[in-house]
Image (tube, grey):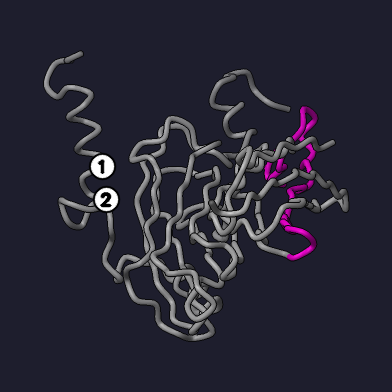
Amino acid sequence: MTHKGMSRRELLGAAIAPLFVSGLTREIAAADIPQHIQALIVEATGGVTPSRGKVKLTLPAIAESGNSVPLKLQVDSPMTAESYVRSIHIFSARNPRPVIARFHLGPQSGRAEVNTRIRLAGTQEVFALAIMSDASAWLGSTGVVVTAAACTDEKQEQQRNDPTPRT
Amino acid sequence: MANARIQVPASLSQGEVFEVRVLIRHPMETGLRHNDIGQLIPQNVIHLLTCRYNGVEVFRAELFPGVAANPYVSFFTTAVASGELEVSWTDDGGQTGTERASVMVLPRS
């Protein structure tokens, strides 16, 4: 469906493009990690600086509703007694509360993969931090465009939709 | 308030890594919403979810308001023996819930 000038697809593409540092992936540069997220990372790793890699975070590129966005988290690890993922932490750059979830695994997990559904308050980056049994830390992230955000203040939404004056 | 479903494969072979899928009915109230008369609805989310396999904890999740309502969580574990998976959870209101699923583990042929 094309309107005058840009089609909807082109408009959406233009909106997503700035989120991408490289044209091929949705990974962002270290410089793009917000300060409050950096603090949460340091707190979780006990000061160990995470490396990029091993963590694959899969979220839809575009979420129609921020109320329930499917998330898949996979960490490359043999999951043996000698080498396994101890914990995985999910952080949101823009939600009112940045910590979304923390998962604790062990060698008996067999595979470091977790699926869940999260809330996203608007278009943003989501970060996943994996901490290994040897205390090393790995970071992955991806961007999601959210067309209808969760966590918005209902009052603001009501005022937008209802023009009658409030007491 | 909460009902739950656990899905595990119908049969497993010894040592097989399998997925456990959990769905719990719970509003996961964020504490940021207001009721019709403008009062803040207090936060009440499931903040802890654990899975024990024949009594041994094999998975633990700390959940926060950023997890969607009616939380769905799936994870993996290894089929060590036949028995029972027990998923338990606690919410901010102190309510707890438990759901169990049997696992049948056959010796590897």
- Residue behind mark 1: A16
The one nearer the camera, A38 or A111, is A111
How crowded is the residue under tag 1: few (<14 C-alpha within 10 Å), some, or many (20+)?
some
Q: Main secondary structure of the magenta part?
A: loop
User: Which amino acid is tagged 1?
Assistant: Ile
Q: In x, y percent, where is residue A92?
A: 48, 56
Write the start and end of the magenta stretch as one range.
B27-56
Q: Is residue B22 magenta?
A: no
User: Which amino acid is tagged 2?
Assistant: Leu
Q: In x, y percent, where is residue B35?
A: 77, 32
Of all chains, the one bearing label 1 is A
Lateral position of residue B20 relative to residue A75, left or right? right
Residue drawn at (65%, 54%) of the image: B64
Residue drawn at (39%, 48%) of the image: A58
Q: Which label belongs to residue A19?
A: 2
Q: Most extreme residue toward the front, as rendered? A: B109
Task: For mark 2, give the secondary structure.
Answer: helix
How crowded is the residue under tag 2: few (<14 C-alpha within 10 Å), some, or many (20+)?
some
Q: Quadrant of the C terminus of chain A?
A: top right
Q: Quadrant of the N terminus of chain A?
A: top left
Task: For mark 1, give the secondary structure.
Answer: helix
Lateral position of residue A143 relative to residue A48, left or right? left
Rendered view: A38 above or below B37: below
Q: In x, y percent, where is residue A24?
A: 17, 51
Lateral position of residue A62 relative to residue B84, left or right? left
Q: Which label belongs to residue A25?
A: none
Contact? badges 2 and 1 (CB < 8 Å): yes
Marks 2 and 1 on same chain:
yes
Q: Is residue B42 magenta?
A: yes
